[in-house]
Image (spheres, coloured by chain):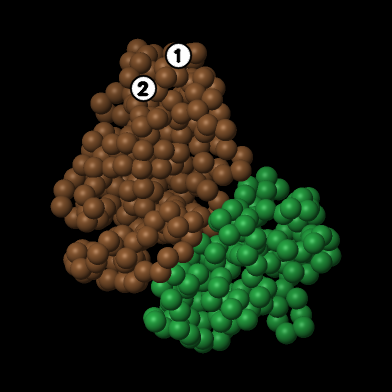
Amino acid sequence: MPTVSMTVNGKQVSGEVEGRTLLVEFLRENLRLTGTHVGCDTSQCGACVVHIDGNSAKSCSMLAIQANGTKVTTIEGLANGDELHPMQAAFKEHHGLQCGFCTPGMVMSAVDLVKKKPKASEHEIREWLEGNICRCTGYHNIVKAIQHAQQTM
Amino acid sequence: MYDFAYHKPSSVADAMAALKAADDGKFLAGGMTMIPTLKQRLAQPSDLIDLSGVGDLVGITVSGGAVTIGAMTTHAAVATSTDVQSAIPALAALAGGIGDPQVRNRGTIGGSVANNDPAADYPAACLALGATIKTDRREMAADDFFTDLFETALADDEIILSVSFPKPSKAAYQKFDNPASRYALVGVFVAQTAGGPRVAVTGSGQNGVFRVPGMESALASSWSADAVKGMAVDAGTLNSDIHASAEYRAHLIGVMAGRAVTAAG
């Protein structure tokens, strides 16, 4: 079986995978990083969003081996010890979650947005979230949280 | 997903060799269609040959009145390229409207064009702008490249190297997208090219992307939204599905063509 190695949340990790092992399976099952969720498993919902070399990607739609040699950041890698990342703090402050299932993907996608378009308008924020589905339909507070994080990140 | 052997060659020649050595190998570009297809067990290749290690397939150059985009260049790279934005803004805008940000970060122009999904955006740009698709062995005009639903003129072992778009004097793309999938129910790309106006429609045709000669000649007489307004496209050649009937799509083509001409200026 092929071996993959990558940097996940700043730590060098490696493991044996099958060619068909998805990145999200490697993160959740091999590394036990279960903050990254699998919602739809058909590339639509975005609960599985992580960063690959700084760009958000759906970890259910890529192979673990495609991430070989990359730097991966998951939701577990955002906080600095007990101190929440500004985006996480903003989601908490603005009640940007209800059941919380979509939240890891929402936060990871939102961090990518604020890095790439720091001054995104409300409309641009909503467009950016096209790939993240919240089944509690709590979008208003998610958008408010992201607007808050635009000031604090 | 069925298992497969994975290869990541660093040159086009090595990629071809890996494919030749495989029982039933497939090239992997960004994987935004391939991986979901494999997950649903709709394909069972013996080998996947990942082209992301072939460095010279990535990049954007503007020269000689054309924008040339390497096959493994992502949609996000095209959308945010200031070179593409200034040379062919309609192309940058189209790339920025594909799927969602995460799909745009991984998906590539070569993968999109080779897959020729009947609702994909890039085939409309290729056809309307009169693009040239360059492979390891030849150059093909977009008019000869897209042959049918999910079918192209590519041989099984042929690799797209780049897609070259001649700069039009004006162009615009207007998409009426499915609100869930973001695929085009109807997408119309209009361009005023050196050879005259060209109009290409995606999301609708029973045989994939197609041109609309009637609209092209109307726009040649008068480049205006009124020239194409209400112009009928034969619904008999269009798809009907749960999202839209052929008649509705035929109507939308006229509407979106008009909007595209207005947007192009």
Can you tell which chain is drawn green? A
Q: Which residue is mark 1?
A: B231
Marks 2/1 same chain: yes
**Of the residues shown, which amino acid type is indicated by label 1?**
Met
Percent x, y of residue B161 = 26, 55
Quadrant for residue A119, please give it: bottom right
Q: Residue at x 39, y 81 (%)?
A: A2
Quadrant for residue B50, please give it: bottom left
Give how far apart the Cα atoms at labels 2 and 1 are.
10 Å
Residue B188, visible in the rendered structure: no
Q: Is residue A33 rendered to the left or right of residue B154?
A: right
> Which badge, 2 or 1, is on the more N-terminal residue?
2
Residues marked 2 and 1 touching at CB (< 8 Å):
yes
Percent x, y of residue B46 = 32, 65
Q: Residue at x 32, y 48 (%)?
A: B114
Estimate how packed mark 2 is, as few (under 14), some (14 to 19) or many (20 or more) residues with alpha carbons within 10 Å.
Answer: some
**Of the residues shown, which amino acid type is indicated by label 2?**
Val
Residue B195, visible in the rendered structure: yes
Which chain is home to disc 1?
A: B
Which of the two residues, A126 or A6, is positioned nearer the viewer here? Answer: A6
Q: Which residue is mark 2?
A: B212
Can you tell which chain is drawn brown? B
